[in-house]
Amino acid sequence: MRSFIKTLLLFSAAISIVWLQGCKPKGTQSAVSGDAAAKVYVAPGKYDEFYNFVSGGFSGQMSVYGIPSGRLLRVIPVFSVDPEKGYGYSEETKSMLNTSHGFVPWDDLHHIALSETDGIQDGRWVFANGNNTPRIARVDLKTFRTAEIIEIPNSGGNHSSPFITENSEYVVAGTRFSIPMDNSNGDVPINTYKSNFKGTVSFISVDKTTGNMNIAFQILMPGVNFDLARAGKGKSHGWMFFSCYNSERANTLLEQNASQKDKDFIIAVNWKKAEEYLKAGKGKKESVKYAHNTYDEKKHSATSVIETEVTVLDSKDLADMVYMIPCPKSPHGCDTDPSGEYIVASGKLAATIPVFSFTKMQQAIASKTFEGEYEGIPVLKYDAVLYGEVKKPGLGPLHTEFDDKGFAYTSFFVSSEIVKWNVKTLEVVDRVPTYYSIGHLSVPGGPTRKPWGKYVIAYNKITKDRYLPTGPELAQSAQLYSIEGDKMKLLLDFPTIGEPHYAEAIPAELIMKNSQKIYKIEENQNPFAALGDKFARVERKGNEVHVYMTSIRSHFTPDNIEGVKMGDIVYFHVTNLEQDWDMPHGFAVKGANNAELLVMPGETQTLAWKPERVGIFPFYCTDFCSALHQEMQGYIRVSPAGSNVPISFGTGKTDSTTVAAK
Ligand code: RUQ
Ligand code: CUA
């Protein structure tokens, strides 16, 4: 995608020069009609109709917007540390970012998948991929917090991920880079790519009740690059469709070398068949290493386990499990329509959009209408599977979403537009410009069996002149269009966090009713909790000093602490005793090489601090919690190593029980 993007950026640079010379798409301003403001206006105190979960790209986070207002509601830390929330900094959350490579505090989050039941969004979880160090995360939509992260072995660049099946049986991940398998000798010349490098697609099961993920199996694939995917639905439930590029299997200058062939592939995987093979013991257990991190909502802490085995099914040995469909020029998006009959492949360098038919694919498989084999996998005849082509739709098609009225919406990077077409007749019925260079797009419920329709949102790669300039880097931008009428209508621009890729939108009522307000103090099982002021204390264990601290409006207990010495590590275990919605307390101490804690009502979080000098160190609450928030503060005294200051602590003690250091 990178080098492709580069090529396209050259294109679009040329296009933007044209713009600068006065050929700006017509109506940059006038594209917005008179009633647009009323359509996106959500009065103060009123709620938006949809939540929009937007990937943060290289920010590694996910952000949540209200639609139609475009108001930012929350940034959920997923793969990157977040000092604002203490995520990845508190002792309880550090393990969430553990991997087989150790602590990895950043990633590149591209795709969002909301959980589904019967092919309809159910509002329970949202999944996201870590592109760089292959991982999938699950965010719990009761708390809007990352609940689990699983690393994916035998993978490099987890781009084709995560894509969810109709009943959330699996979240599925395809490797972008083919690589030597983890259990092989990876120390091989790069130019032995064709013999040593392989691809995999991973099926990660999702527990129906808890949402817990497990790698059920991987399928070993030829060494191509997997780009995107979609699950079948309805009649095609049980199948997964992946787009791939680099069928040339080039290992250098892919920009040219992976664009040699006229066609790459959509790879169709019959995962029900794969399940049969798995049951029949056809999988091979391979030793690998990957981290599996889960956050316990009762203990308020994460644990990381390193798993050591994965079951692999080989696509070339197991018949009737994997088929390839030729697809013009470097397909990117691969999307299935709400009925599950049509598979839309967007070849980013192609001039048409091929639409494949699931029924025809089944017939072609039954009649063995193959045009050959690719690495031992049958290749179906293009014409035998093709339903039809959308002719001259635009330049650089990337992704397609669907509405509830039989229309598809495809994003075009190079020609900067959204094109609406009829899924049955393949006729283009409308097009609107985007500002500028759209990547993904999202219709509420667009990837499911039941799109909610109403809007399409564009996530653009380039912003240029849309907002006040902010130096060399500009906010990337989303644009909201109404799709209620025959014509798409631009309603609103709103800036986004990081670089948005895919996003999903869901009716707010499916999530808000389940939203958690507090952590119940009586359910707090954090081993370091102090469940009341009377349990607040300071204990020394060798060179560790454990401060069991409570916070409630507007003081800490204890707020005066002495007896810490140089060489000690101090653990502040802060329990927020509040049981009111929206009443977090923060905690920060001067000089900490760390971040703050932001502790939710009823929760316990721990900050580790290694003082690096002798003296008095103030600490305070960082979250404005009451009129006396500024009074919510305290001191901790650090004495030289070997001094005889005993541990002492208190709140509201004015007569000193402590002694001066000698
Ligand atoms: S990709 S702009 Cu990383 Cu989803 Cu298509
Ligand atoms: Cu607690 Cu401010």
Image (cartoon, grey):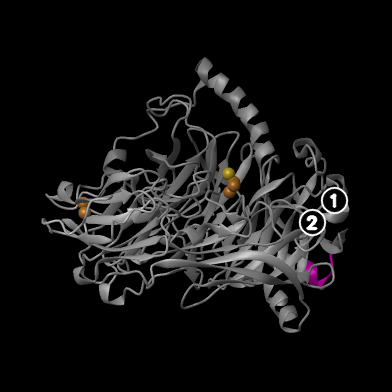
Q: Where is residue 184 drawn, in percent x and y? A: 81, 61
Circle 1: residue type: Val
Tell me if residue 440 comes above or below residue 528 in the rendering: above
Q: Quadrant of the N terminus?
A: top right
Give the residue at mark 1: 188
Circle 2: residue type: Pro
Give the residue at mark 2: 180
Q: Residue at x 68, y 43 (%)?
A: 352
Q: Secondary structure at mark 2?
A: loop
Q: Secondary structure at mark 1?
A: loop
Q: Residue at x 24, y 71 (%)?
A: 535
Q: Is 607 in the magenta? A: no
Within 10 Å of disc 1 (Cα), the crowding (few <14, some 14-19, many 20+) is few
Q: Where is residue 296 drawn, in percent x and y? A: 43, 71
Q: Which portion, as a residue range, is magenta?
A: 364-369
Given residues 547 and 118, the one toward you in this image is 547
Q: Residue furthest front?
A: 662
Q: Is 367 in the magenta? A: yes
Of the numbered discs 1 and 2, the one sitting upstream in the chain is 2
The answer to whether residue 627 is seen in the rendering is yes
- Work out how far the residue at label 1 is from the one at label 2, CA to CA, in angstroms: 8 Å
| CB atoms of marks 1 and 2 within 8 Å | yes
Given residues 498 and 87, the one toward you in this image is 87
Q: Where is residue 6 drawn, in percent x and y? A: 65, 33
Of marks 1 and 2, the one in the foreground: 1
Q: Where is residue 174 drawn, in percent x and y? A: 67, 58
Q: Is residue 101 left or right of residue 527?
A: right
